[in-house]
Each structure stands twice: as structure tokens, then as C-alpha cells.
Image (spheres, rainbow, N blue to C red):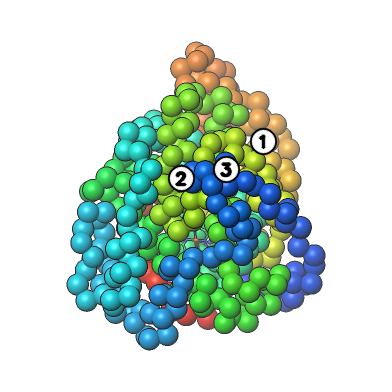
Amino acid sequence: MDGLSRRKMLVTGGTLGAIGALAAASPARARSVWTWSPSASVAGTGAGVDPEWVWDEEADPVLASVIDRGDVPRVNTLLKRWTRNDQPLPDGLPADLKEFMEHARQMPPWADKGKLDRAAQFSKTKGIYVGALYGLGSGLMSTAIPREARAVYYSKGGADMKDRIAKTARLGYDIGDLDAYLPQGSMIVTAVKTRMVHAAVRHLLPQSPGWSQTSGGQKIPISQADIMVTWHSLATFVMRRMKEWGVRVNAADSEAYLHVWQVSAHMLGVSDEYIPASWDAANAQSKQVLDPILAHSPEGEALTNVLLGIVAELDAGLTRPLISAFTRYTLGGEVGDMIGLSRQPILEKLISTAWPLLVAFREGLIPLPAVPAVLWTLEEALRKFILLFLAEGRPIAIDIPDVNRPS
Ligand code: HEM
């Protein structure tokens, strides 16, 4: 990161303490009552308990104990060697953690290899849309999810927000890797490590004064409802927008894409009774858990600046108005306002007219359209962003934290 954006981050960080108290006092948007039925889930049945009150009863006690025993540095060193799905766990891991991980690395019995392969092919052929939607759509939407923004901001990784924010968007992108869940791939490893990081965060964040003062009464972060909120900001949102843009998605591809995300939710520790079995069920759940909670938070705004700063780094800021306009088009003006994206009326109008034409051309539906040159600049900027931001240095190196963000 260059000096300018680092300074910007520090300035934004400095103002947070002051406005954090205000944010804590302002009413949070109400969450809907949980009425989503487990009959619409991959399990097809379940107790129907509100996932707001469910965390991860297998991972949480184990990771709390690993942290309290002071085992985290040793475990992180050992885990660096565990990178492939088919690799045995490294020798020397604490017995309780090893037992948990052996269980957690098992794919669900309902995982379907054919669908996973198809999903990978689909994500590859639709690379530019999927990448742009994860990076600029889901990535920026996460800053309008106050609980996620705050958890990220006050946890250890919040000290390097660029790295942190890149990792969640990258996980979405990596799910589309051709060998993600194959023996030589790394998604099982990434998901199990992420599940352990989330469990560690549940133990650590309640000890953070910054988080406790802004958590709106939540005592333990990252509930299963919270995970599904983020899941919808990735999977449900991306599928919905691709269809709206006129990207060709046949029924088998759509089902395969859903499947890879169902498997990923399971691997992240979400109970099967909360994982939607169909897109209809996903859309209904998204309406209940995601739509009502989108809101502005100072932590979210700080994260937005970091993410847009990354894009600006690619071309010295030239396309920032263009990227703002594209993101407003992608997320909608309301969310754009929430996260503090600058309004670009002329560019927004231009993009909303010309982008669907560009998509139709890329999908082979129409001949080369007469679109303003700025659209090709936008497409080029998106490609560059995807290449540098999402594809750099895989696989993601994930460490279990043992402290919060130093205040
Ligand atoms: C860590 C992905 C849901 C908060 C991570 C990491 C990944 C990830 C890949 C590891 C990155 C690293 O090592 O820094 C996901 C995915 C989710 C999800 C795919 C849902 C589908 C959530 C939710 C919250 C959250 C709902 C909070 C409400 C965090 C925090 C960290 C983390 C605080 C640790 C950052 C640190 O290192 O300090 N997540 N996450 N995540 N996630 Fe999530």
C-alpha cells in the first residue's frame, strides 16, 4: 500500500473512536423474526431454532482451549504445511484440535462431484462477471453489513484491512477454482482453517472493548445467522445479478453454482438445516436475514475506503469515479449511499444503459455494440482488478488469531 492510502487509513481509523460511540447509540435496523423453515434446507428437517442463537458447538470450545493454553503460535506453524485437500494433518497438532479437524475436513455425504465440477467450469467461463461481482459487489456489500464490518475491524486482521478484506472476497473466488474440492485442491483446507479462525474470533472479540461497545448487544460474534448473511452477500447476490445482467445461466449451471456454495457453507460449520436447498429458498432466506440488516457503520465506511483505495492503486486513481459508478449500479443507490460511495449520475446512467449491451455481446447474443469508450476502460479496469486483487499469490494463507486488533 502506498503512503497516501496508509495515511488515509490511519486518519479514518482515528476518527472511528469518536464516532463509534455515536454509532452504538443509534438504533440498529431491526432484524426480521426467523420464520424460515428447515424443510427448505438441504437437511430437509430440523429443530427450526433461530440461527441468531447458534454458533459452532464443535469448533468453539476447542479453539477457546487452544488459545487459552497458548498453543496458537505452535499450531499456526504446523498448519502452514497443511495446504492440499488430500494431505494428512501435520504431526504434532494438539489431540483435541486434531480430532476436530479430522471430522471437520469430511465432505458432507450429499456433496455431488458432478455438480462441483460443473460449478467450477461455470465460474471459469463467467470469470469476469463472477470476479467483478465478488470483488466489487460482495466485497463492498460486506462493508454495509455492520456486524461483519465491526468484527473485521476490531479483530487482529483489522490492523491490515486490505489483506483482510481481500481474503473474504478471495474465498468466494477460490470456491470457483477448477480443483477447489478435488484431492489436489485447497478449498477443504481453506474452509476448515476459516472455521477455526471464526471460532477463535468468537472467543477473542468479546474481550475487545471496541467491539463490545459497538456490538449492539450481541455477546458472541459470528452466529450461524451472521454466516448466512455473508453467504447471501456472496452466492445469492452474485447469481441474482448475473441473471439481471443477462448472463446466460442454464438450469444445470445455476444448480451447480448453488451446490458449491451449499458444500462451502457446510464446510464452514453451518448446520445443514440452515443451508437453502434451492435458489427460491435462498432468495426467501436472504430477504429475511440480509436485506433488513444492511446499514451504514463507521467501521464499514473505513473498510470501503480501503477497498476503493486498492482499486485506485491499480491505476493511480484514474478510474475511481468509474468504479464508484459501477459499484453503485451493481449494489444499487441505497447501499451505495450507505457505504459512502460518491454519486456519479452521468457515469451511472451510462453504465446502466451500456453494461447490459456489453454483457450481451460477451455472451454472443448480439454483434459488437456501439458503447461509449469509457465502458471498455471499465472492463479493462475490472480485469486488472480481478487479476491483481483476487488471483494474487494463492492459496490464501490463513492464521488463527490469538489477540484482537491492538487499540
Ligand atoms: C476470517 C471468510 C463469515 C468475520 C475469515 C477468513 C476467511 C473468511 C477466508 C480468514 C482470513 C484471514 O486469515 O484473515 C468468510 C466467509 C464467510 C464469513 C466465506 C461466510 C460465508 C463471517 C462473518 C463474520 C466474519 C459473518 C462476522 C460477523 C471474520 C473475522 C475474521 C474472519 C473477524 C478474522 C479476521 C482476523 O484475522 O482477525 N473469514 N467469513 N466472517 N472472518 Fe469470516
Residue 40: where, in percent of width, then height? 57, 41
Rendered residue at 37%/69% (across/down): 399
The amino acid type of the residue labelled 3 equals Ser
Which is in the foreground here, disc 3 or disc 2? 3
Q: Is residue 179 above or below residue 226?
A: above
Rendered residue at 33%/61% (across/down): 103
The amino acid type of the residue labelled 2 equals Gln
Q: Quadrant of the C terminus?
A: bottom right
Residue holding disc 2: 262
Rendered residue at 38%/86% (across/down): 69
Q: Is residue 166 visible?
A: no
Marks 1,2: beta carbons within 8 A: no
Q: Earlier in the sequence, mark 3 or mark 1?
A: 3
Which is in the foreground here, disc 3 or disc 1? 3
The amino acid type of the residue labelled 1 equals Leu
Q: Earlier in the sequence, mark 3 or mark 2?
A: 3
Mark on residue 118?
none
Q: Secondary structure at mark 1?
A: helix
- Rounded to the nearest angstrom, the CA distance separating label 1 from label 2 is 36 Å
Asked whether, in this view, residue 352 is left or right of residue 89, the answer is: right
> Looking at the image, which is closer to me, 309 or 54?
54
Rendered residue at 27%/49% (across/down): 185
- Rounded to the nearest angstrom, the CA distance separating label 3 from label 1 is 44 Å
Residue holding disc 1: 347
Which is in the foreground here, disc 1 or disc 2? 2
Residue holding disc 3: 39
> Looking at the image, which is closer to me, 64 or 125?
64
